[in-house]
Amino acid sequence: MEELMTHKTIDESRQGEALTLPDRANGPGSKKFYIESYGCAMNFADSEVVASILQNEGFGSTTEPEVADLIFINTCSIREKAEQTVRKRLTTLKSYKRKNPGMLVGVLGCMAERLKTALLEEEKLVDIVVGPDAYRTLPQLISEAETGQKAVNVLLSREETYADISPIRLNSNAVTAFVSIMRGCNNMCSFCVVPFTRGRERSRDAYSVVKECEALFNEGYKEVTLLGQNVDSYHFIDEAGNKAISFANLLAMVADISPELRVRFSTSHPKDITDDVLFTIAKYENICNYIHLPVQSGSTRILSLMNRTYSREWYVAKVNRIREILPDCGLSTDMIVGFCTETEDDHQQSLSLMEYCQYDLAYMYFYSERPGTLAARRFEDDIPEEVKKKRLQQMVDLHRIHSLKSMQKDVGKTFKVLIEGVSKKNDGELFGRNDQNKVIVFPKENFQKGQYVNVKVERCTAGTLIGKVVW
Ligand code: SAM
Ligand code: SF4
Ligand code: F3S
């Protein structure tokens, strides 16, 4: 069944992207690794940690899987389709291994964690299986696999944050970067596999986050996105300073690096985002006015079955509060249709909530049962596929109207835009984003990526604002 969605932090076009290091990292005679990433931004950020660990061990990299000594696939388990994509990809890799029998194939990330050694049984070509908290042991696992044994480490940790590892920025535009601030998730949303694949929530040392962001800024980066499954529950105890650092504190610390460094973050959980966070966003010009606030459903009954711990009314009050404190804030969400027992009335409530919130962006999915989750154990996945499909299509159609309206509202306005690069569709144009995370394209003239410019919007499509630089 085809999955429908609009935007993503990591959009569909980047799924399966091969990551590469600059050539200088490829030492003479070094073994070469190839790494491909699937799933969310956290997985893409993890691949940069993996690259750093491998580079420190003297491995080089390649973007061509055919010539690699080691192939790593960093995988996602969030929906069944995500796993099917990886399995298809593994099938293609078989032909490379046939031509180059010495090649080792490793599965990393959430699917490795979910399936553990079963993956070795199911996918015979796989030599190495490594869960998200075990990347430091990759060099030993590779040595083990080189002797012909299968190598597995899927131990989850309560402490690992890779705080001391400087990720190697792969396929970077040298302007924007992801920075992980925490790992795991302590929420138990009944549909979600993440607590099982990523383990308990832990916050990374705040000073190591600031140091990494400072280093990025000094290298010329102009935007960092702080990443976690639930950033608002960030909580770091600074034992030396004898104080607790909250997410609002961390945002301020990163924003203080320089007014020229933009700060974004993802993802917020409606139950945890505080007024403190909203006031911190309001206070700093360089903290972007954009919040991704997944709701999942507009029906309180379904929200309760999902174990989201808030009601429709509670969520609406949160959105009202955001609009009160941050009137220009961009707002996006995640929605699931066809969750267990969802009635037509529940679905209508999701649509009416979308009507109320008028999201600028929405990522919409139909429910995909994940083995081992609370929902899989407790409830029947009882909504027929064609009903899920129909509801998803209705939701996508409704959201299209909202997103177009949101774009049209911006025509005639002028925004500060951080230039990210040359437009994919027209090399005479540049593109960047405004504070609210909307993509804006404009004529190139003599502008460079990494520069801030003011762009007056002249027209729009459903996904892009189009304008001209003004002074
Ligand atoms: N931590 C974030 C949160 O609390 O919203 C997002 C986590 S998940 C990586 C991204 C989105 O995938 C979720 O917000 C949810 O909409 C969707 N998702 C998770 N499990 C799903 C499932 N079993 N079926 C369909 N969509 C799912
Ligand atoms: Fe999954 Fe819920 Fe955690 Fe998000 S908050 S990762 S949806 S369990
Ligand atoms: Fe997928 Fe794991 Fe991210 S399941 S969405 S890669 S945390």
Image (cartoon, helix red, strand yellow):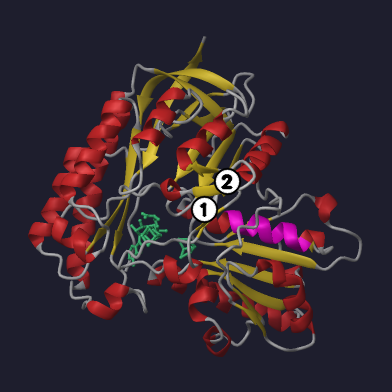
**Magenta-colored segment: predominant secondary structure:** helix
Q: Mark 2 sits on what residue?
A: 178
Determine the residue located farthest toward the left in the rendered image: 345
Q: Mark 1 sits on what residue?
A: 41
Is the residue 257 above or below the residue 165 in the image? above
Ligand 1: quadrant of the figure: bottom left
Q: CA distance from mark 2 to mark 1?
A: 7 Å
Q: Is residue 138 magenta?
A: no
Is the residue 419 above or below the residue 125 in the image? above
Q: Secondary structure at mark 2?
A: strand
Q: Is residue 51 magenta?
A: yes
* Beta carbon at label 1 within 8 Å of ligand 3: yes
**Occupied quadrant, residue 415:** top left
* Beta carbon at label 2 within 8 Å of ligand 3: no
Q: Which residues are magenta?
A: 45-54
**Occupied quadrant, residue 159:** bottom right
**Residue 53: x, y in percent?**
74, 61
